[in-house]
Image: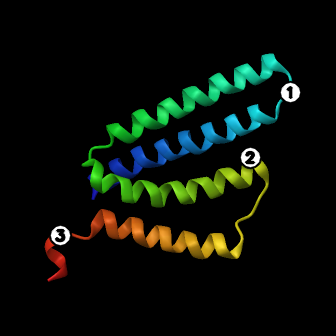
Amino acid sequence: MSKFFVILGFLVVATLLEASGDAVVRHALGNHAWPQRAVLFVAGGVLLFGYGLMLNLAPLEFSRVVGLYIATLFVVWQVVNFFAFRTLPTAPILVGGALILAGGLIVSFWRAGAAA
């Protein structure tokens, strides 16, 4: 079970970096002062690079890590969206998100021989 928490730790850090990097870039696009915009673009780029690095360092084969990553990403995006943009998820987002979470868990934990 401790390996699961290590993998989950990598994924949570990766998703925090990706969602935060995306939010910083979105703020940069709306900022009209070029010096501030440039700093925000660089900061967003650094965060997005960190996301790619953390995701690929996760100790799990890539085909299985992607499902759990997408599920984790959905949850973290909603949290970042709330704090960065003060937006709550709507009913369609929650229903679709439940499907994303279910799909991510299926992709990550359903063993190939378990269907028979």
Residue at the farthest bottom position:
116
Q: Position of residue 113 (x, y in %)?
A: 13, 73
Horizontally, is 6 left or right of 27 in the view?
left
Name the residue rendered at 69%, 53% in the picture. Answer: 81
| Image marks 2 and 1: residues in contact by CB distance under 8 Å | no
Q: Position of residue 14 (x, y in %)?
A: 47, 42
Amino acid identity at mark 2: Ala
Q: According to the image, label 3 marks what residue? A: 112
Crowding at dot 3, Cα within 10 Å, few <14 / some 14-19 / many 20+, comes out as few
Residue at the farthest top position:
35
Looking at the rendering, in which quadrant would you find the N terminus?
A: bottom left
| Image marks 1 and 3: residues in contact by CB distance under 8 Å | no
Name the residue rendered at 63%, 22% in the picture. Answer: 42
Q: CA distance from mark 2 to mark 3?
A: 40 Å
The mark nearer the N terminus, 2 or 3, is: 2
Amino acid identity at mark 1: His
Crowding at dot 2, Cα within 10 Å, few <14 / some 14-19 / many 20+, comes out as few
Could you say which disc has been placed on residue 103 in the image? none
Could you say which disc has been placed on residue 84 in the image? 2
Horizontally, is 94 left or right of 90 in the view?
left
Question: Where 108 falls versus 16 (above or below)?
Answer: below
Q: According to the image, label 1 marks what residue? A: 32
Crowding at dot 1, Cα within 10 Å, few <14 / some 14-19 / many 20+, comes out as few
Looking at the rendering, in which quadrant would you find the C terminus?
A: bottom left
Q: CA distance from mark 1 to mark 3?
A: 52 Å
Badge 1 marks a residue whose secondary structure is: loop
Badge 3 marks a residue whose secondary structure is: helix
The mark nearer the N terminus, 2 or 1, is: 1
Q: Position of residue 47 (x, y in %)?
A: 56, 32
Horizontally, is 107 left or right of 31 in the view?
left
| Foreground: disc 2 or disc 1 | 1
Q: Out of 62 and 83, give the one closest to the viewer.
A: 62
